[in-house]
Every structure is written in C-alpha cells, then in structure tokens.
C-alpha cells in the first residue's frame, strides 16, 4: 500500500482521534443542559465551548462521530449481505431471476440516491433504525451489480467448470470458489460505500429525517449551528471539519486498498 496514502489517511484521522480522546478525558455529558453556560467560549471545563442549551460541544462531537461510524458500518454490512446474495443468485442462475433482480436494481438506480433515501426515511419516520433501513434500501445495488459482473466473468473459468463437473452444489461453489476470488473488488466497494453513507447520514440528519434531538449527529449539529452562524460560527466549523476529515480518510484508505488489490495496477507500476 502506498506510504503517501497511509500518511494522508493518518493525518485525516487525527482530528477524529483527538476528539474521541479529549472527550473521554473530559468526562462531560453532552446531553446535560446548563442554561448558565449558554454559548460559552472555550475553557478547561468545556474545551470547545457549549451550544445554545449549554451542552458540551466536545462530547456531542464525539457522540456524533461514533454514531456516524456505527451507522455507516451497519449500512454497508447489511447492504453488502443483501447485495452480494442477490448478485450471486443473479449471476449464477441467469434467466428470469437475473432479469428480475437487475431490473429491480435499475429501478433503484433510476432515482438519485439521496432523494430515494429521503423518501424512504420520510415514509419510515425519523430515528436511527429507520435511517439505517433507508440507506440500506439504496446501498445494496452497487454490491449486487458488482457481484453479478464478477460471477459472470468467473463462470467459464476452468476451476469453476471443474467444480460443476465434480457435482458440487451451488452454495459450495459460491463460498469455496466464487467469494474468495471476488473479495478484493467487494472490499474496495465497501470502503467507498462507508464514506458515501457517512455523507448520506449527515445529509438526512441535516434535513431532519435522520437522527433526532437530543441525540447528537454531525448533520444535526451542522443544522443547529447554521442558525447561530453569526454568533457562534465554530458550532458549524467543528462538525464540518470532523465530517470532512473522516470522509477524506475513508476515501484515501479506499484508494490505497484499490491500488493494493488491483492486479492490473500492480503490473502497471511494475
């Protein structure tokens, strides 16, 4: 993996790591309302100040950061499970099943992802669980199409034909031969998917159909801070920096992972 990408990834992760460490040391409660310290400046008690309700910004940033990571990992894991399963069935079975599954994927792709997620979240209602389901409803398509394409390219290779001739079942061939050989592109897809979900979660929470108060999210913090932009601009700057650096770190890691796992890239550099 290129050292430059790893260094840049570490630099981008530094703000998030520092916030988590500082929040753990400070021991403040980001849900505790203190109207005597409304919009307080930086201090030893509140390292990043407080919001309009006197809540500690540092602890809320750490909570929003952890929620963003948790939601993105959960969405990508669920989307990968659904998408890879459907992609395997479509690519291996072919015929009417392949047609139905790919037309379903085409229908999902015909809508802008964020608009479809907003519609799903609005129908399901606000909340973290519904937010995850709305993002999974959009996120499975990339895994399904990638898996199907990889399976179609492997069906005619000799070792798969040999496994079929030996009478192995489709599930055995999928887990023993297909999945290990398509794991690399799926890992890269997952890494970029995590970054996309982080932005999607923040966007939906910003619009009010995602995480709801008093729970902290980077998106809700940016929305609340935008109303106080002229009075306390750092309420927007801090969650913006955290979101930007976290997404940048994941994207850089995805680039490095792609360069490492792509055989054609290695041959080109060689």
Image (cartoon, helix red, strand yellow):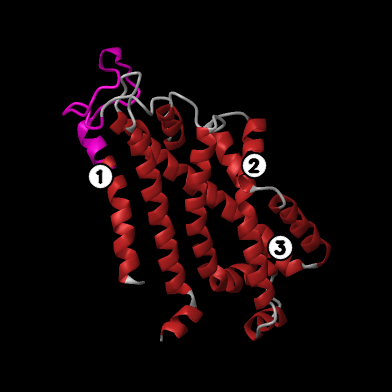
Q: Are marks 3 and 2 in contact (CB under 8 Å)?
A: no
Mark in the foreground, 3 or 1: 1
Mark 1, Cα crowd under 10 Å, few <14 / some 14-19 / many 20+, is few
Mark in the foreground, 2 or 1: 2
Q: Position of residue 20 (x, y in %)?
A: 28, 41
- Residue 214 or 155: which is nearer the viewer? 214
Q: Position of residue 200 (x, y in %)?
A: 53, 44
Q: Name the element at disc 2.
A: helix
What is the CA distance from the residue labelled 3 to the residue labelled 1? Answer: 44 Å
- Residue visible at 74% across and 56% down in the picture: 106
- Residue visible at 62% across and 37% down in the picture: 118
What is the CA distance from the residue labelled 2 to the residue labelled 1? Answer: 34 Å
Classify the position of the C terminus by image quarter.
Answer: bottom left
Which residue in the protein does label 1 denote? 18
- Image: 138 above or below 5: above
Quick one: which residue is furthest to the right in this view? 96
Mark in the foreground, 3 or 2: 2
Residue 115 image label: 2
Q: Name the element at disc 3.
A: helix
Left or right: 10 as drawn, with respect to 94 = left
Residue 211 image label: none
Residue 46 falls inside the magenta stretch = yes
The magenta segment is 20-48
Which residue in the protein does label 3 denote? 89
Left or right: 104 as drawn, with respect to 32 = right
- Residue visible at 57% across and 55% down in the picture: 80
């Amino acid at each position: 993996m290129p050292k430059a990408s790893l260094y840049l990834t570490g630099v981008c992760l530094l703000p998030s790591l520092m916030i988590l460490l500082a929040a753990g040391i400070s021991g403040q409660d980001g849900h505790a309302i203190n109207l005597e310290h409304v919009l307080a400046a930086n201090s030893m008690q509140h390292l990043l100040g407080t919001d309009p309700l006197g809540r500690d910004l540092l602890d809320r940033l750490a909570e929003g950061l952890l929620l963003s990571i948790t939601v993105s990992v959960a969405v990508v894991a669920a989307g990968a499970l659904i998408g890879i399963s459907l992609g395997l069935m479509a690519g291996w079975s072919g015929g009417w099943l392949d047609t139905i599954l790919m037309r379903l994927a085409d229908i999902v792709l015909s809508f802008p992802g964020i608009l479809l997620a907003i519609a799903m979240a609005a129908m399901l209602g606000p909340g973290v669980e519904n937010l995850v389901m709305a993002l999974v409803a959009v996120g499975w398509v990339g895994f399904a199409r990638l898996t199907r394409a990889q399976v179609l390219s492997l069906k005619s290779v000799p070792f798969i034909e040999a496994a079929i001739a030996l009478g192995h079942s489709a599930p055995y061939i999928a887990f023993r031969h297909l999945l290990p050989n398509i794991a690399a592109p799926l890992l890269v897809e997952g890494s970029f998917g995590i970054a996309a979900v982080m932005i999607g979660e923040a966007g939906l929470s910003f619009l009010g159909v995602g995480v709801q108060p008093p729970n902290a999210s980077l998106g809700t913090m940016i929305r609340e801070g935008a109303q106080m932009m002229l009075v306390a601009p750092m309420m927007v700057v801090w969650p913006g920096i955290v979101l930007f650096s976290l997404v940048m770190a994941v994207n850089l890691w995805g680039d490095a992972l792609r360069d490492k796992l792509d055989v054609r890239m290695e041959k080109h550099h060689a």
